Amino acid sequence: MVVDMTLEAWNHTLEANLTSNWSLIRKFAPRMKQQGAGRILNVSSYFGGEKYLAVAYPNRADYSVSKAGQRALAEILSRHLGPEIQINAMAPGPVDGARLRGLGGAPGLFARRGRLILENKRLNRVHEALLASLEGTDGGEILQRLAANVVEGLAAWDGAPEALRRLAAQVGEGRPEAAATRYLLSRPLAEKLINRLVGGGALDAAQGGHFLEVFTPPPEGDFFDARDIERTAQKIEVGILDRLHLHRMPTDEQVALSTVFSLADEIVSGETFHPSGGLKFDRSVTEGEMLLRPGAEDLQQLAGRHVVLIGEALRDELVAIAHGLLEQSVGSLTLLTKSAETAEALRACIEAPGPGTVVGVQAVGEELEAGLDAVRGQTGRIDAVVSTPFARLPMNPLAAEAGESWDRVLSRDAFARLLDEQLTHHFRVARKCALMPRCQIVLVTPETSRASTREEFALALFIKNSLHAFTVTLGVEGERLPTEPAVNQVQLTRRAHAEEPSNDQEMAEEMERIVQAVMLCCVPAVSPSQSRYLARIFRGNAVTV
């Protein structure tokens, strides 16, 4: 899950699937342009989505973002690399081959996913029970009992909080011989649990460190019974086959043949092929327009809430959003910037409307997580966070004409920096805030206008499509987390360049829509415990202004 993913793992996937993709294209495109012909096929995935549509891939947000990026690259580069070069994307679903079934004793994809699902179910159950039990206590005895890690001992504890009693009863119903029935957590799950509790502020670092020091791990060996893993894997496979119109997965050979056919087509560029056996979308979200502004009843729910705005590049937008929120009598408003210069400029533009609202501006440099921890320490909680980029989009061209120099074309390092500033930035904010109870997370994409260059607009489309894969995936994961966060995306780039505002009046109208969209996404979303149906509707959306 996003909240358990390390920054290193996230960066590794984006480096392997996206940065390397751009680097390879940049190396070969000049020669293709020079020779007057070339074909590029990006290998994306079903989980990379389609134009204007994102597909959730719980537990692998990094993968879905990277694959959505590979698809979006094909779409945006087709105009820049043409007419000499065709570039398309291939997006297969599950492929019935060695990777799926396993090879040389290694587990296949379904088995790995089955184990991961069991691990996350256990982790979420323990996390939920512990949050309920720690509330209003110092947690000393509870953590001591939990560190012993014996289900039977927890069930026999007369003073156990009700949430832990229910947890012990649920866990104890499994196979008697399985370690997962006799013990609450494996060592890796215990470490993830503590990272969640410390990251979300339920425990301090010293408490978390002590817990891991005294934690009693289960005996060595598989934590979950192999039969339970296999049963879960079979459920995954049956679910996949049920969503295939052809009721069979393509083989490696069939996907290879589709690749040949795709490369042989001489008149297609910027498109995505789906050799998936007719895979149906189980859970998908399309981007949509903000048609109506939030009503007075919605906005009243912002009163007294503690809101954080993060950003550097979009100063005018941050000021407008801040004024809009202050008009709703939020309890506190804190702005986190990268530089002291921007902090000082924003501080001069934003003042508290009265004694009932606390306004603060802090420069945090690269220390986003520490900055959020400091705000939570000052205000007691964070109810909503609005994440905007620290940096603007690069101005470099994305290709050069045949025979021209590629020295100014966006370099590999500049592309990697773009991913860090426009995608990883939001990952870090959302990963942290999703651990804070009922936090509303609003991710804002780069701003463009009619004055934006063709290259800026193309990169903005690339970012908003890639980010939506993250937003929709965390939206689904948020329904399963005990903290019940809600994440949505506000897009400042429209589908077509001609639709962008072109004069002062239209710019002012767009600014008003931006403020309204952000405030709408800050309104508390329905929780899954209240209505699973409504909870799904109000999570993972991409709202275009």
Image: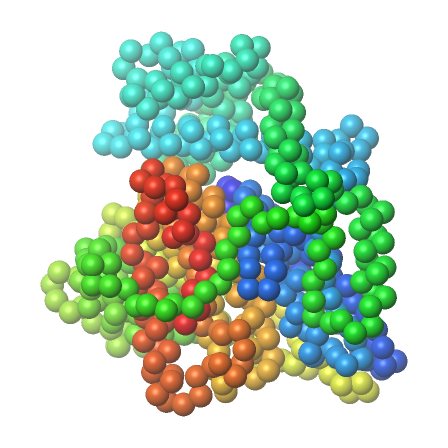
Q: Is residue 461 visible?
A: yes
- Specify the farthest residue to the right: 35
Q: Is residue 291 above or below residue 457?
A: above
Q: Quadrant of residue 21?
A: bottom right
Q: Is residue 80 above or below residue 72?
A: below
Query: Who is closer to the viewer here, 235 or 104?
Result: 235
Query: Who is closer to the viewer here, 248 or 426?
Result: 248
Q: Which residue is located at x 66 percent, y 34 percent?
A: 237
Q: Which residue is located at x 63 percent, y 65 percent?
A: 72
Q: Which residue is located at x 32 percent, y 58 percent?
A: 522
- Specify the farthest residue to the bottom: 503
**Image spot of residue 90 (x, y percent):** 73, 58
**Image spot of residue 430 (x, y percent):** 44, 53
Query: Who is closer to the viewer here, 127 or 361?
Result: 127
Locate residue 134 relative to residue 214 in the image: left or right. Answer: left
Picture quarter with the C terminus: bottom left
Q: Which residue is located at x 75 percent, y 79 percent?
A: 82
**Image spot of residue 286 (x, y percent):** 51, 60
Q: Is residue 433 visible?
A: no
Q: Is residue 6 above or below residue 447?
A: above
Locate residue 450 relative to residue 75 in the image: left or right. Answer: left
